[in-house]
Amino acid sequence: MNPNEIDIHKELKKYFGFDQFKGLQEQVIKSILGKENTFVIMPTGGGKSLCYQLPALFQEGTAIVVSPLIALMKNQVDAIRSVSSEDGIAHVLNSSLTKTEINQVKKDITSGITKLLYVAPESLAKEEYVDFLKSVKISFIAIDEAHCISEWGHDFRPEYRNLKNIIKHLGNVPVIGLTATATPKVQEDILKNLDMSDARTFKASFNRPNLYYEIRPKTKNVESDIIKFIKQNKGKSGIIYCLSRKKVEEIAHVLQVNGISAVPYHAGLDAKTRAKHQDMFLMEDVDVVVATIAFGMGIDKPDVRFVIHHDIPKSLESYYQETGRAGRDGGEGHCLAYYSYKDVEKLEKFMSGKPVAEQEIGFALLQEVVAYAETSMSRRKFLLHYFGEEFDNETGEGGDMDDNVRNPKPKSEAKENVVKVLQVVRDTKHLYKTKEIVYTLLGKVNAVIKAHRTDAQSFFGCGSDKDERYWMALIRQVLVAGLLNKDIETYGILKLSESGAAFIKNPTSFTMTEDHEYSEEEDDAIVA
Ligand code: ADP
């Protein structure tokens, strides 16, 4: 079909009632109509679904939509059916259907009524279905939530890896991949694993200019700090994310006792309570919901004015998704996260029970969160850079909307001290984790140091002019800079990297950000 022959604006109005396309939708749809493989990267709420729904509705044949979530598929099918007099216009094909239902789906597809067929990747693996689909006209295949194909995404699904072969079986059909995960690594994985390196790529900006990003040190006073913040924002809606159910309950209780209308939300509450608390938040019967990451999927409250992270998230993707729930209406949205390295260690400990490959990825993603929290550069610039987007604070929208830009942190030159750290790691023969390296620098003994007789070495205590907090912060910044590596197999042993060895030989300027105090919090289990 020649894309120029169709008035896609007319079709948009007819099916969805919209007068205009949003963002890149029009270009994406033209690419699909031109039968090209197409790759769409847009933040949540960007309008991805319409990119495949609209061309499917007016093209000949059936579009196959691969989606990982049954609930999501059902919602979409209901939405499509509401714009048509024909129920058969959209179907879900999955194992829960009866034989009669499956026959009806097949009949509707064969007779050309069905324009969108939603399938889970595992259903598409069934030979019976593939054989049937081979015999009918397919307009294109849309792979929704395409990041599920990548182990570097936040929701890896091994079944997605099979899609490439299935698509090949279906013949020469254009493929459109869609995702809201913008990291270059995930994008590369998607293109490779879907065998569509030729795809035309459409990437929307991930910049949310109305959001203000701020990180505060997590001290013992974190709860009173949160209460103060909420009281300063009286009457506004907000979400507080915690990593454990226990913390959610605790914080919700503390807020209630302090006269703030707040409810908890986590997967440990029964479905009825969860639904009730969610409704209370949406209907503004309460101002604040304190939640684990279980809260938020599909929450579309436009006027959330703040998102507070009581604990740091596992990755910057999660952070972006979670903070993204603020200011959907384009109004004010304050994103405040409390950071303490103890939380990082808690998450590392939690991950250490997982398979090695998963751990490695988990640690790497966490390292990026640490780098984000500790950076002294613009947070927006850092975040967008992580998503493969260059941002200029002078000219870009929202350029002054973060704490680092508004209140630059004190910085100091740490070249000589970096060399000290690297030499100590090298000269203690790659035996120690951060703690023992810091002790060696300070000249402090413990059983491990005694056992290796490090206290008898000439360099023992070579950094006693600085305190523990300074060395801990510097080592983390040196890790982020890649001069040291943390060995995953041995869970945390520090090793000199090649660039670290080069730095010792030829030291260059190293600007470190002055750090804050850390809280001593009790451990609690992390369960969403
Ligand atoms: P995504 O899948 O990217 O998260 P959705 O497809 O759910 O986004 O779309 C987000 C919202 O934007 C929906 O409420 C949808 O109806 C709306 N929307 C999509 N396209 C348009 C458009 N062209 N004009 C107005 N609203 C749109």
Image (cartoon, rainbow, N blue to C red):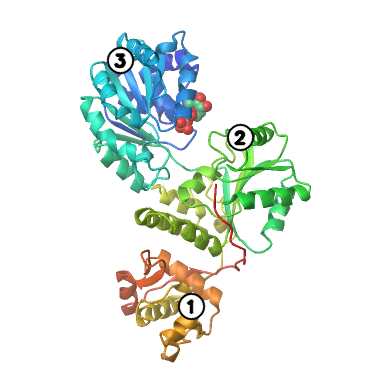
| Disc 2 residue lies near ligand 1 with CB under 8 A | no
| Between 242 and 371, the one nearer to me in the picture | 242
Few, some or many C-alpha atoms within 10 Å of disc 2 (few <14, some 14-19, many ≥20)? few
Q: Which mark is residue 438?
A: 1
Inspect the image, locate mark 2, and give the three-letter code of the amino acid beneath it: Ala
Q: Residue at x 79, y 47 (%)?
A: 259
Badge 1 marks a residue whose secondary structure is: helix
Badge 2 marks a residue whose secondary structure is: helix
- Residue 265 visible in rendering: yes
Q: Is residue 247 above or below residue 408?
A: above
What's the CA distance linking mark 3 and mark 1? Answer: 66 Å
Badge 3 marks a residue whose secondary structure is: loop
Q: x, y (%) of residue 253?
A: 72, 49
Inspect the image, locate mark 1, and give the three-letter code of the amino acid beneath it: Val
What's the CA distance linking mark 3 and mark 2? Answer: 40 Å
Q: Which tag, 3 or 2, sits closer to the chain's start?
A: 3
From the image, state whether disc 3 or disc 2 is nearer to you.
Answer: 2
Answer with left or right where residue 432 lies relative to residue 263.
left
Q: Which tag, 3 or 1, sits closer to the chain's start?
A: 3
Which residue in the structure is indicated by mark 3? 61
Q: Quadrant of residue 187?
A: top left
Which residue in the structure is indicated by mark 2? 271
Q: Is residue 39 above or below residue 462?
A: above
